[in-house]
Amino acid sequence: PVATNKTRYNTISILALVFTIPFIGGGIIGIILGLVALHQIKKSGERGRTVALIAVITSSVLFIVWLAYLIFILAFLKW
């Protein structure tokens, strides 16, 4: 059986979830890939919208936490 667009998960949505893991940039790659995946899913009808949304939301929260941490460190760092 051949996978159709309705049964296949969008690859970029899965990559977005993988790149949600915070490393340099605090998940910004996950946000970008998640948004690209959402756009592709809207056009193609593939599965993975929920995965992409989870990646965007989680990456956004991690980015905000990373940014707050960076601001905190820079604000209280004595040069």
Image (cartoon, rainbow, N blue to C red):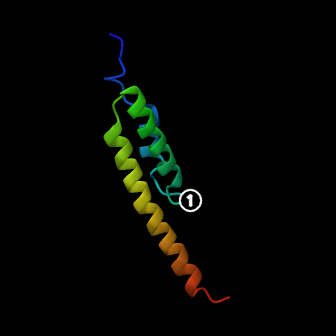
Q: Farthest bottom residue?
A: 78
Residue projecting furthest to the top: 1
Tell me if residue 71 comes above or below residue 55 in the rendering: below
Q: Nearer the viewer, residue 9 or 43?
A: 43
Residue in the picture at 59% in, 80% down: 74
Residue 15 percent across, percent down from the top left: 46, 40
Instruction: Please tell me in which quadrant of the rendered image residue 60 appears.
Output: bottom left
Residue 63 position, x and y percent, is: 47, 62
Residue type beneath disc 1: Gly
Crowd around label 1: few <14 · some 14–19 · many ≥20 (10 Å): few
Residue reaching furthest to the right: 79
Q: Quadrant of the N terminus?
A: top left
Along the horizontal axis of the image, is 17 left or right of 25? left
- The x, y position of residue 23, in whole percent, is 53, 57
Within the image, what quadrant is residue 11 found in?
top left
Please give left or right for residue 7 compared with residue 75 in the image: left
Number of numbered labels in the structure image = 1
Residue 58, x across and y down, in percent: 38, 55
- What residue do we see at 47% from left, 51% from top? 31
Q: Quadrant of residue 44?
A: top left
Q: Which residue is mark 1?
A: 25
Q: Which element carries disc 1, helix, strand or loop?
A: loop
Q: Quadrant of the C terminus?
A: bottom right
